[in-house]
Amino acid sequence: MNRIEEIIAIMEDVSRYPAKAIRESMEETGKEVIGCFPLYTPEEIVYAAGMIPVGLWGGQKEIKKADKYLQSFCCSIMKENMEHGMEGSYEFLSAIIIPAYCDTLKCVCENWKAAVPDIPLIAMVYPQNRKITAGVEYLVNEYKRVKDELEKISGKKITEKELEESIDLYEEYRKTMSQFVAIASKYPRTIDAKKRHSIIKAAYFTDKKWYIPLIKELTTELNMLPEEAFNGIKVIATGILAEPEVLLDTLVQNNITFAADDLAHESRQFRTGVSNSGTPLERLALRIAGNQKCALLYDEEKTRGQLLLDLVKEYKADGVVVFMMKFCDPEEFDYPIYKKELEAAKIPMLYLEIEQKMDSVEQIRTRIQSFKEMLTV
Ligand code: SF4
């Protein structure tokens, strides 16, 4: 096994067994852990508090208890998170943070207190008008509240210096990941769609100080190899997240790779950096203000379609694959707008309606195969 394979295997192990990876991080660092619900939870504040933020983006459990609290039309990520909470899978968490971006998250916030009373909840709201001064001030105050709550849990004050250092670390993470995905697109056989997903996902379950050097090393090792020839199909992936993994297996089997992505779980996490001016909390709030082209952040100009067109052009992609999370209203509202733009530009598109745990993926498998045949004729 060469070093590239070794690092990929480590990342695959972390993303396949997140609880094990989190417990190991806790043992190694002696830190407490805070669960962060999607999407842009201020991990920097958690890290500055001397705790490890871990991402809670659902799972693969059979839903038995969560239905008591969540309606049938809630997305599967939230049902999974609720089920995991009620089943005790999150018992190592000192608290969870839920940012209320959508109606489902608002509903989960209220129900969490009753359904999982043992894990304290820190709820926060993102302003709809995040770019105006009042919106930035509001978000700074929300972050202050999160900071206060975390200080109560950790029993110590978070200093400005700790916040600045944490922001620096997360900026390094964002830069490292942006470099990694750019390089990975040149090695579509070594970093196929599934491996790419596992490598990015592993960041949610480890201390960034452990994760960043490994990704840098992987990027350096890849960079030393000649670019890989690829006779398959390159696509841009868009949506909330690209799961369940069996879909990624099907894409790989059909020689379809991700040239780049616009997934909330992946590149949307690291494509926008913080502002250089202001207090640490203002810098974080301005990062959200400057974040564009995401269904969860109000975009009056509806620029996501142009982003997808730009990515197709930049990466010479053959098409776009839409991973539509079932019952995700914000993503569903965006879809008709960018669909029209992609169709006008004659960009082939594959629409996959997904849930994290699907009883049958046969229909989707057939659609992926048809998409491939359509593009290879
Ligand atoms: S934004 Fe979509 S996927 Fe995320 S919690 Fe809301 S409904 Fe679920």
Image: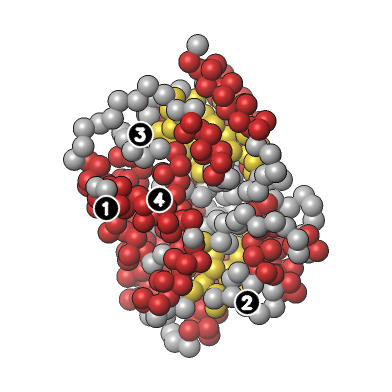
- Between discs 4 and 3, the one toward the N terminus: 3
What amino acid does circle 2 point to? Ile
Residue at the location (61% across, 31% down)?
365
6 to 260, vertically: above or below: below
Percent position of residue 191, x then y? 36, 40
**Real-space CA distance between mark 2 and mark 3, rounded to the nearest whole angstrom:** 42 Å
What amino acid does circle 4 point to? Ile
- Between discs 2 and 1, the one toward the N terminus: 2
Farthest left residue in view: 224
Q: Residue 199 carries which label?
A: 4
- Between discs 1 and 3, the one toward the N terminus: 3
Q: Residue 216 carries which label?
A: 1
Which tag is nearer the camera, tag 1 or tag 4? 4
Decide: few, some or many residues near mark 4? Use Cα within 10 Å; few <14, some 14-19, many ≥20.
Answer: many
What amino acid does circle 3 point to? Arg
In the image, the residue with mark 2 has its CB under 8 Å from the nearest atom of ligand 1: no
Farthest top residue in view: 377
Decide: few, some or many residues near mark 2? Use Cα within 10 Å; few <14, some 14-19, many ≥20.
Answer: many
Which tag is nearer the camera, tag 1 or tag 3? 3
**Real-space CA distance between mark 4 and mark 3, rounded to the nearest whole angstrom:** 15 Å
Residue 236 visible in the shown view: no
- Between discs 2 and 3, the one toward the N terminus: 2
